Image: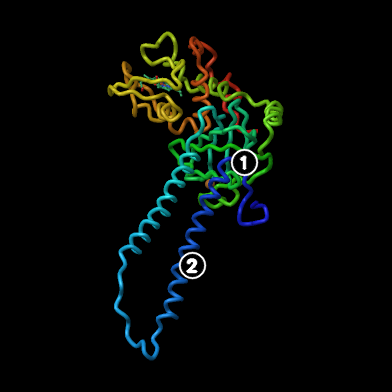
Amino acid sequence: MWNEVPLFPEQASTAAPWVDSLYLMLVAISTIMTLLVAGALFVFCVKYRRRPGHERALPAVASTRVEVFVMLFMLLVFLSIFFIGARVYYMTNQPPPNSMDIYVVGKQWMWHLQHPGGQREINELHVPINTPIKVTMTSQDVIHDFSIPAFRVKQDVIPGRYAYMWFNATKPGKYHLFCAEYCGTDHSQMVGWVIAMEPRDYQEWLRTRSDESAASRGRKLFLQFQCITCHNRESSNRAPLLEEIYGNRVPLQAGTSVIADDAYLRESILQPKAKIVAGYRPIMPSYQGQADERDILDLIAFIRSLGPNQTPLRNEDSDPRKQQGATTDDP
Ligand SMILES: [Cu+2]
């Protein structure tokens, strides 16, 4: 319906019709209210103008019935905006539990995107249609904003923490991807494309990419950063084993506990002293400045993949000189 209206980008996600309806409703209500007030103003100006025989204002007549009616009517109209708005907000902010994960790192001035299998892209994101996709995002430097107008999604990406959003594309096609937060000189270059494909084509596309998996990159970093000297089987009384912790509850020294999600793991690596695991001493060094956001995503993917007895052996080749290509940058 909006194809002919250049003001509106295509509706290409499940959220788009909802967001547009809400927006349209707001515009309609505002227009009607404006016309009512301006119309009444105009009519009364003419009807009650000063003229011979009507030199002075008539005494005002108050009608409780009219006033109560108008107030209740307004209340209803504006509360409906609230309820419909809340409904759309919740819908667009809660990723369905079976979503596919995409990881995004924004930095001046590009988007790094990563697929569950480790495939990496820059300023381009291939996604399957009719699949809920949860995007976990962070920034390496300043505030950016990940925005796909055709999907009606837009989320600030803030350094130092993970932000989330989700969408479900409905139409194959090529859509604009923007940074929608002024982030420095080349902000206007921080643009790209989202390519929505039939799930079959997406699988085909994935196959053509031979990137190393994120978990396997993370494994190399785990050895290279010497995480292994503490987090290993022999010295598990010194540091906790990281096997099967992802998504599970970790007891903390403070007596509380926390779910080991992406944000917690990230914090554990960058600010190990923020939350100390019960039964251990705070001896872990911070990797702030050493591991960048993409390294951290890889480390998290590795920790996430660690099943029982899968921690690498301590004496496994961890010599950085033999770890050629451990931190290879993008192609
Ligand atoms: Cu930006």
Q: Quadrant of the C terminus?
A: top right
Which residue: 51% across, 38% down?
A: 165
Q: Disc 2 residue type?
A: Leu
Vertical position of residue 242 compared to residue 170: above or below = above
Mark 2 touching mark 1, by CB under 8 A?
Answer: no
Question: At 51% from the left edge and 31% from the top edge, which residue is drawn?
Answer: 96
From the viewer's perspective, is residue 199 above or below residue 320?
below
Q: Nearer the viewer, residue 215 or 250?
A: 250
Q: Position of residue 238 (x, y in %)?
A: 36, 14
Q: Amino acid at mark 1?
A: Asn
As drawn, the residue found furthest toward the bottom would be 52
Q: Secondary structure at mark 1?
A: loop
Q: Is residue 172 above or below residue 262?
A: below
Q: Residue 11 placed where, x, y %?
A: 62, 46
278 in relation to 57, above or below: above
Residue identifier under label 1? 123
Labels 2 and 1: the sequence-earlier one: 2
Query: What is the quadrant of residue 204 in the picture?
Result: top right
Q: Tell me the SS state at disc 2.
A: helix
Q: Which residue is mark 2?
A: 35
The image position of residue 304, as x and y in percent, is 50, 21
Q: Quadrant of residue 65?
A: bottom left
Residue 16 circle label: none
